[in-house]
Structures are given as structure tokens and as C-alpha cells.
Amino acid sequence: MKRLVYLALSFSVLLLSTALAQTVAVVTPYLAQPGTQFMVEAFEAAAKGKGWTVNVIDTAGDVAAVISRIEDMVTQGVDAIVINVDPAQVAAGLASAESAGIPVFGMDAGTDPMLVTNVTSNGYAMATETATYVVDRIGGAGQVVMFVFDPYPPVQKRGVVADAIFGNYPDIEIVDRITPDVSDGGIADSRAKMEAVLAANPDAGSISAVWAAWDQPALGALQAIEDAGRAEEGIVIVGIDANPQALDAISASGNFEASVAQDFNGIGSTTADLVERYLGGESITQATVYVPTTLVTGSNVGAFLGE
């Protein structure tokens, strides 16, 4: 009897050790973006608590390289892969993982039949909040500059919604629709492109607002507007993410007036929990899991700054 109990306990310990000793790869070309950094760090923290080994791979803006890195992880036999990139652009890598029976999860990526699920914020809702904020602030009339990024699904859908909302107001004109270079994070190139827009529209009041699909372009536009001496024109700037620089800018009560706080920690930890549940044998049927967001303006920014 004692031998049977010993064997049962040994088997249980073996199962527990196997469950804990998971190796998970996180692959992204966007680690230079603050939001991605926060998500990855939250995932790593959650994974550490689960006893996993996490291999974070940043291809530094090279989306095509994500495919080969996924294939490398497949060769290494990891237990799961998490991607932060448009799945449609890395289909060959996903197919490789699928053939090997390695589950792939999206972390603020996009939906795809080869992903178990995708954990993200509701981009449609975030764009609706910020675009309608702009419409209300400029009274439904004026010239708007948009910063978008169509190659990345979570950001691309924000631009689609903003286009639709602005298009519903005949007195709103889209002066420019800019896709900045994000290889260095996006601020510097957005600043340069906004400087060009300001130079092409030199008259006071010729730009009413800047709508940015995420905070980095909004911050670059803010720098350009301030350096051009045009902050007093009341150009309204909004972004999405509510990263620390954006919160500081909103708190300063200047042109940068609003952003949307994504729960990056929640996205990272929720992704880790779903990986754990799936590897534990649970079926995940929800193609997209949304984590709640909050509109941040001057009225509530203090709460996000711990004031």
C-alpha cells in the first residue's frame, strides 16, 4: 500500500513539474513601442509566477523576419508561441507551428484561424472615443491631420473607424493621412512629417486637430507644433495608449488633450493565463478576448499619475 501511495505521489509531482516546465516564445517586431514593452513585461511576470521559461524575440521592425524566428522556435520545440504582429503577414510561420502541433496565441495581434485566440483592446471602441472627442472639441468643422498605421491590424482598425466618424461630418477636412516610420518608436518621424504639414499650412487656424492612432505620433506632432510656435492656436491632439509621456502631456493642459488607457498589464497577464489554460487541456473558443480600456483627459489624468 505504501508503495502505491509513493508511486501516486511521484506521478503527481511529475505531472506538476511537467506543467510548470513550459517554454514559451514571444515574437514581435514592435518591442520599440512602449505598449508592446509593457505587454511583454507583464506576460514575462505572469509566466515567471507559473514557472515557465520565456524567450522574447524582437526582430526590430522586420516583419518578414518574424516568420523565420517562429520557424526557429518550432525547431526548438517550444510548448507555445505568442505573437505581436499581423498574423496575415506571418502565415508561413503560423503554418509551420500548426504542422508541428505548437499552439500560437496573439497578444494585441489580429484574428486568424491558425491562432488559438487573440488578446487585445477593442480598437473600434478606442477610435470611436478619440475621434468623437475631436469632433466635439472642434464643433464638427475644421482641418484634421491623421496618423495611422495600416500594416498592423489593431492599429489599422482604429484608422478605419476614425475615417468613418470624420467622414460623417461634411465640414471636417482630412488635411493629411500619415503613416510614420516606426522603426525608432515613431516619435521622430512623426515630428518631421508634422513639421512638413505645418509648413504647408502656415496660417493660424489652418490645422484644427491631430488624431493619432497611438501616442507616439501624437507626441511627435506635439513637439512639432510647440517648436513651430503654434501651440497657442489651440490645435487639439489625441492619441491612444496613455503611455507615461502622453499622461504627462495631458496633465500639462496643453494641446495633447486625450488618450485611451489600454490595460497592457491585463493584456499580458490574460494572454499568459489563456496559454496556461490551453496547455492544461482546456478548449478556448473565443477568437478575440477584449481587455477593458479608459478614456483619459484632463479631468481624470491625475488618477493615472497616482496623484
Image (spheres, rainbow, N blue to C red):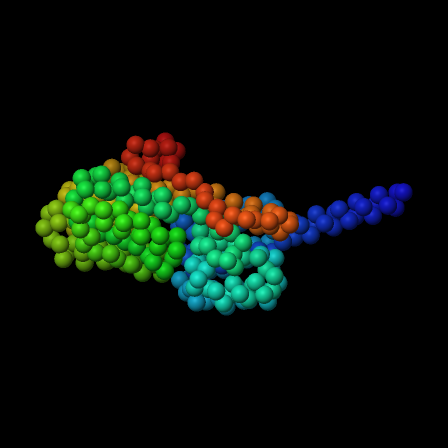
- Camera-nearest residue between 146 and 167: 167
Q: Position of residue 92 (x, y in %)?
A: 49, 67
Q: How many marks?
A: 0
Q: Position of residue 165 (x, y in %)?
A: 26, 46
- Camera-nearest residue between 91 and 305: 91
Q: Position of residue 290 (x, y in %)?
A: 45, 44
Q: Position of residue 242 (x, y in %)?
A: 35, 43
Residue drawn at point x = 34 percent, y = 38 percent: 295
Residue drawn at point x = 90 percent, y = 42 percent: 1
Left or right: where 192 falls relative to 107: left
Q: In the picture, which quadrant includes the C terminus?
A: top left
Determine if residue 147 is in view.
yes
Determine if residue 249 is in view.
no
Residue drawn at point x = 64 percent, y = 49 percent: 280
Left or right: where 160 falls relative to 169: right
Left or right: where 2 falls relative to 281: right
Residue sitting farthest toward the left: 203
Left or right: where 120 falls relative to 184: right
Residue drawn at point x = 31 percent, y = 49 percent: 161
Where is residue 306, by image quadrant?
A: top left
